[in-house]
Image (spheres, helix red, strand yellow):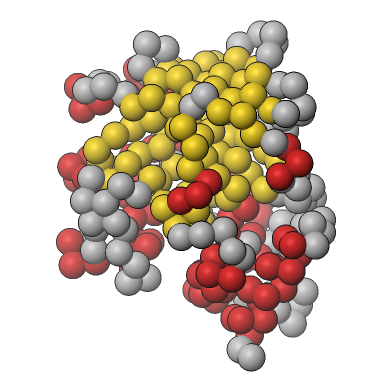
Amino acid sequence: MSKIENIARFIVNEHKEKNKYVNLPNNLKPTNIEESYLAQNVFQKKIGRGDIGGYKIALASKVQQELCGIDHPIAGGIFKNEIYNSPTEININNFYGLGLEFELAMEISEDLTNEMGSFNSENVKKYISNIYASFEMIIDRDADYNNIDPYSMAADNAWCGGIVLGNPIENWLDINFENLSSILHWNNEKPENAKIMDSDPFVSLAWVINLKLSQNIVITKGSKIITGSVIKTRSPRIGDKIIYEIPNLSTVEIRVN
């Protein structure tokens, strides 16, 4: 059995045994990010969570990258069976170490292939059919955030546990995203505000697409790509009602039970 297969088998077992997250042991640690993605692909096939329906970006900010000792983001896959529409309820017992992130999700309007060339924050907009306010559900398995090996995290599908989509933003091409703010409502706490462009969502979208195309992966029509959180990851508890909105444009809501 190859090293790549052994990495994937180790991570699959860690998930099924509900073990606390640990970086890969030295004999399995990827030597570069390419090995991480090869292991991630095998993990996605062996974990039994279905087909891939989109992609995510992680470690998008320089602060996160410096914390993990890397100089670029990483990507993971979103399973089709784990894409939900708002409002929805989530059972916290289905996750080990659940965190929520607050993002834009973008839907791809046609199949994208590496023959189409490189994408940037402007030309990528021609291939977006819908944009949504969204939650990402993170499976961090109670990781120690002060000790994260980014290659191990990438092999572990960048911790993606699914997404929840709000309603699509109507006429999004006519909107100046530079002026948009979002609001997080967490139970009866004081609402938290954030600028949508703090995550550079169109830059993140282009980065994810270019990465997957460089791996000879076709990004199929209808794929959902999430583009980075504008608010710090939070851990929900049973009974929480959480709403993330771009006022008058898109709202996503979950209840935790």
Q: In this view, which residue lies farthest toward the bottom?
A: 1
The N terminus, quarter of image:
bottom right
Q: Can you give x and y, in whole percent of width and height, for residue 50 in the image? A: 51, 59
The part of the image, by quadrant, that contains residue 200 is top left
Residue ID at (29%, 56%)? 220
Q: Nearer the viewer, residue 30 or 88?
A: 88
Residue 188 in the image: above or below residue 106: above
Q: Position of residue 3 (x, y in %)?
A: 63, 85
Q: In the picture shown, does residue 40 fall above or below 210?
A: below
Seen at 21% across and 27% down, the residue is: 173
Query: At 46% from the left edge and 32% from the top edge, which residue is drawn?
Result: 85
Whole-percent x, y for residue 63 in the image: 60, 43
Residue at x-position 31% and y-position 58% = 219
Relative to 21, say whether 252 is above or below: above
* Rendered location of residue 92, percent (x, y): 73, 37
- Residue 122 visible in the picture: no
Measured along the vertical axis of the image, is residue 67 above or below residue 212?
A: above
On screen, residue 31 versus residue 215, left or right, reads right
- Report the number of discs: 0
Quarter placement of the C terminus: top right
Q: Is residue 78 left or right of residue 26?
A: left
Q: Relative to 61, is 12 on the left or the right?
A: right
Residue 100 visible (yes or no): yes
